[in-house]
Image: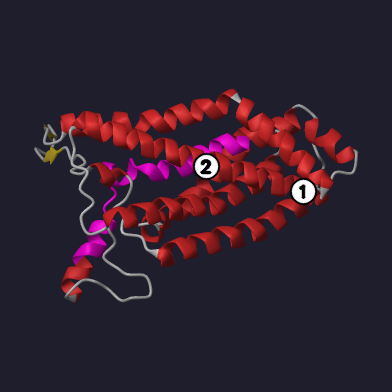
Amino acid sequence: MNGYKTMLKVDMRRLFTSRMFYIMLGIALCMPIAILVMTSSLAGTETTNPQTGEVTVMEGFENTWDIIGSESDTELFGGTKTDSAAEASDNAAMGMNMDMTSMCNINLVYFMLAVFLCVFVGGDFRSGYAKNLFTVRAKKGGYVASKTVVGLIAGAAMLVAFFIGTVLGGNIAGLSFDLGSAGADGLVMCMLAKIFLMGVFTAISLAMSVYAKKHTWLSIMLSLFGGMLLFMMIPMLTPLNSGFMNVFMCLAGGAIFAAAIGSVSRVVLLKTDLV
């Protein structure tokens, strides 16, 4: 236990003195401002394909909170809100439409965390710190737990920075802040759900990092690939009109993934060379 506390203390000091951490926070803050302002200024612009003559209209965000999430048409464990099968089918088709506004949103922060955590953990193996650490009989489980906590804190900070940037960007772009039926409670629950869901992506990135060790490029590629497989699940689990059940599911899922994949990370450290 003392070993875990010592490692956590060192990792927290490294986190808050890391230049890359503050760079990531700056990117998370500026990203929504740039996206909201640019899409608002270009919305409605038409481009014509010279070969086919097809006209494409540039879409933009109609509401500030669209970059945080959209309201779900399905209530978790509560049936659907749609009135007909045809309407449900239309909504499902719209959900599969991967336009710019559905991709350029707060969920990109999960990929930012993956990059940061891979660089953070990779630095331990490149510098020889990890090998020296385990030479003095530091527990592998404590190392994994410490890095998991660091990942959760870093991810939560990036999400908060993105939220602040969203408010600033919405003001600059002159977009509406109307929350509609979601309300302020839904927005708060949405952000909490996204923060708790960080546990899943932290566990994946950490597992890839301890597998690739000093090969940071490999850990980043594997983490991004794993994150892409789950990317489409994020809007469904954390809609703008999230409720207590969404928060609970993300908290439980994050804890289970962190524990299960964390155990895999520990086994990888035990069974492989620390180089």
SS for tag 2?
helix
Out of 256 and 153, give the one closest to the viewer: 153
**Residue type at tag 2:** Gly
> Horizontally, is 267 left or right of 75 in the view?
right
> 120 above or below 73?
above
> Horizontally, is 166 left or right of 82 in the view?
right
Asked if residue 32 lies in the magenta stretch, the reply is no
Asked if residue 92 lies in the magenta stretch, the reply is yes
**Residue type at tag 1:** Gly
* Magenta span: 90-118
The residue beneath circle 2 is 155
Count residues near mark 2 (Cα–Cα under 10 Å), then give few for <14, some for 14-19, many for 20+.
many
The residue beneath circle 1 is 142
Write the residue at 30% across / 28% down. 34
Location of residue 197 in the rendering, given as x and y in whole percent from the top left corner? 50, 54
Q: Give the Cα distance between marks 2 and 1.
A: 20 Å
Write the residue at 25% across / 35% down. 170
Write the residue at 48% across / 31% down. 25
> 112 above or below 80?
above
